[in-house]
Image (cartoon, rainbow, N blue to C red):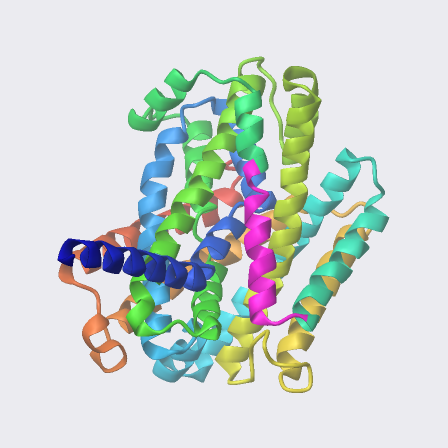
Amino acid sequence: MVQGECITMKNKNFWRNLIIFFSVIGPGIITANVDNDAGGITTYSVAGAHFGYSLIWSFIPIIITLVIIQEMCSRMAVVTGKGLADLIREEFGVKITFYAMVILMLSNLFNTISEFAGIAASAELFGISKYILVPLCAIFVWWLIVKGTYKSVEKIFLVACLFYLSYIFSGFISKPSWKEVAQSSLRPALHFNKAYLFMLIGVIGTTIAPWMQFYQQSSVVEKGIKIENYKYARWDVIIGAFVVNIIAIFIVVVCASTLFKNGIRIETAKDAALCLKPLAGDYCFYLFAFGLLNASVFSACILPLSTAYSVCEGMGWEVGVNKRLREAPQFYTLYTSIIILGAAIILLPGVKLIPIMLISQATNGILLPFVLIFMLLLINNKRLMGNFTNSRIYNILTIIVIIAMIGLSVFLFFASFAGGG
């Protein structure tokens, strides 16, 4: 009898934990998946097409790095109940916050333009005019946030994350050598030539951008996750880090097993989709093209939203998808303005995307080291975090990550404008 009661209790606890887990997940998975945006897909496509499977090993340290950084954001959000921009303003002053927000706003604007460029490229792949699809997507993105609540928006975002599976399907359709994929994952193949190193840094550099830390912390706060449920939020971060990088690996695999194998070089994700059609068939082409459209629309929602969260928190204004337009006018005005600008610029005839992406990369490189240092100082502040500060080992790992990311950011900043690619 006692044994039966114990089994029943275990079953109840299992279902209770599962329900709590599904109620908590969202911010970590969503933030990570937005990292596979139009720019990320382009980077992974070029990496696979130009270097085959030789860069797949890099995704293992990328996963570890992403977990460390984003876990700290979630922990600060749960313990303090405040967004990252809010904490920076309170602890380091309005002046520093203002300059950080200006750089973040510029960076996210250029990133948003890149997402609408991805939508325009998808329109061409599906034979639709960009002058139809881009405005329609811009209206949808605006309507989704302005008319939604946090719960409804998060559900839609989680569904959008599922559509990234199209890259996994296209990976299997391309019939790669899984033995080579496994070997490349476990055996780093470093080549000390300029093109390979620049591509390696590009792959790593697409993983962590300043908007991610601001958005994740703000969304955890708005979701209202309590400290007693933090272990589930940590799993949300871990799952997100693994999922986003598995998708990235499959993008590399698709292009390596088809384009690299046939000696085809590409410059964009659109090129990759077009070249896949004769090599891997219509299904692979449409799955790849659909993945690009989904990623671009998804990211076009999140990046302006991240900007609105961060800037309004930093300035002490009302924020949140749960608030109505009259309750948070600055929040919705900023969100709307970035969408309008992002969509309008990409519809201008002859607009050049490469300079926009370089400026975005440079502004990310300027801001990221400061954000990571602020995070380390905040997470170790006993007054803010109580017993939830970093352990010594965690601090050592974080410092290593920060030094590596600063070095990466500095290299990317100078290499971008010195013709490093």
As for residue 156 lying within the magenta part, the answer is yes
Count of all numbered marks drawn on residues in the image: 0
Quick check: 218 above or below 383? above
Q: Tell me the chief SS of the magenta region.
A: helix
Q: Is residue 338 above or below residue 198?
A: below
| x then y, percent, for residue 403 | 29, 53
Please state the horizontal and vertical placement of residue 339, each as a whole percent of the image.
70, 63
Q: In which quarter of the image is residue 259?
A: top right
The answer to whether 392 appears left or right of 151 in the picture is: left
Looking at the image, which residue sits at the far top?
262
283 or 278, which is in the foreground?
Answer: 283
Which residue sits furthest front? 1
The residue at 78%/51% (across/down) is 134
Side of 183 relative to 316 (left or right) = left
| Residue 28 within the magenta-colored segment of the rendering | no
Q: Looking at the figure, which quarter contains the N terminus?
A: bottom left
Residue 255 spot, x, y in % from top left: 55, 25
Vertical order, 220 against 40 (above or below): below
Q: Do we see residue 325 in this rendering?
A: yes
Left or right of residue 22: residue 116: right
Residue found at x 42% / y 64%: 24
Q: Which residue is drawn at 35% across and 44% down?
A: 63
The segment highlighted magenta reads: 148-165
| Residue at screen point 32% across, 68% down | 229
Picture quadrant of residue 311 = bottom right
Residue 147 or 308: which is nearer the viewer?
147
Q: Is residue 53 left or right of residue 76?
A: right
Instruction: Give coordinates of residue 277: x percent, y percent.
Output: 69, 21
Q: Could one spot residue 213 in this view of the protein?
A: no
Indicate whether 53 appears above or below 302.
above
